[in-house]
Amino acid sequence: YESLPCDDACEQAWKSKQVKKFVACFLLDLAGAASLAIPPPWGELGDVIYAPVYAYLCFLMFHSKTIAGIAFVKEILILTDLIPFLTGICFIETFFSHHKAVAACGIKHPREHPYEGTFRGPAGMESFQAIRSDGKRGSRG
């Protein structure tokens, strides 16, 4: 990582953002696993609705179409909800982003794209809000 100059303040900034990202990933995985508590067929129907949202949020957080595609497939398949996929990807991004196989999936070091969200999710989620709080339609629809 010598090619990425970073002083102590920069180092501290991306690490604190990565902790927020880890918590957001854990909460998204937990939300996906919640469908297992709902009786069939409603739980799996929830997965069909949640899978594209999960994949889109994954793309916003990791900037990788490959990882987003895998996240979509993972969420849409039956009984794979217990796998903490985003949490694992966050761990891999933080500690193993220098490996060639990880880079081939499009995962970069967090310093290259620091997390710009909160514990509740990544920045960019506002595009999911079709109706704003004032009751008017958003710009997308």
Image (cartoon, helix red, strand yellow):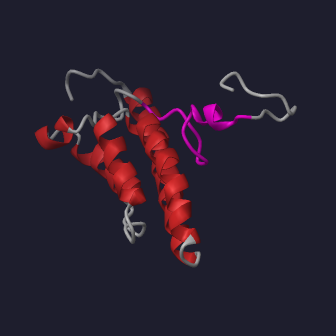
Magenta span: helix, strand or loop, mainly?
A: loop
Instruction: Give me the residue at 12% from left, 38% from top.
Output: 100
Q: Residue 21's x, y, as percent?
A: 47, 45
Q: Is 67 in front, or is 121?
A: 67
Q: Is 116 in front, or is 63?
A: 63
Instruction: Give me the residue at 56% from left, 61% from top.
Output: 46
Relative to 128, say whether 78 is above or below.
below
Instruction: Give me the residue at 52% from left, 50% from top.
Output: 24
Relative placement, left or right, of 93 versus 102 is right
Q: Residue 28's x, y, as percent?
A: 51, 55
User: Does the image show residue 99?
Assistant: yes
Judged from this view, the residue extending furthest toward the right is 134
- Segment colored magenta: 114-130
The quarter in which the C terminus is drawn is top right
Q: Residue 41's x, y, as percent?
A: 54, 73
Instruction: Give me the residue at 22% from left, 39% from top.
Output: 105
Relative placement, left or right, of 119 versus 95 is right
Q: In which quadrant of the rendered view does residue 79 lie? A: bottom left
Q: In which quadrant of the rendered view does residue 101 lie? A: top left
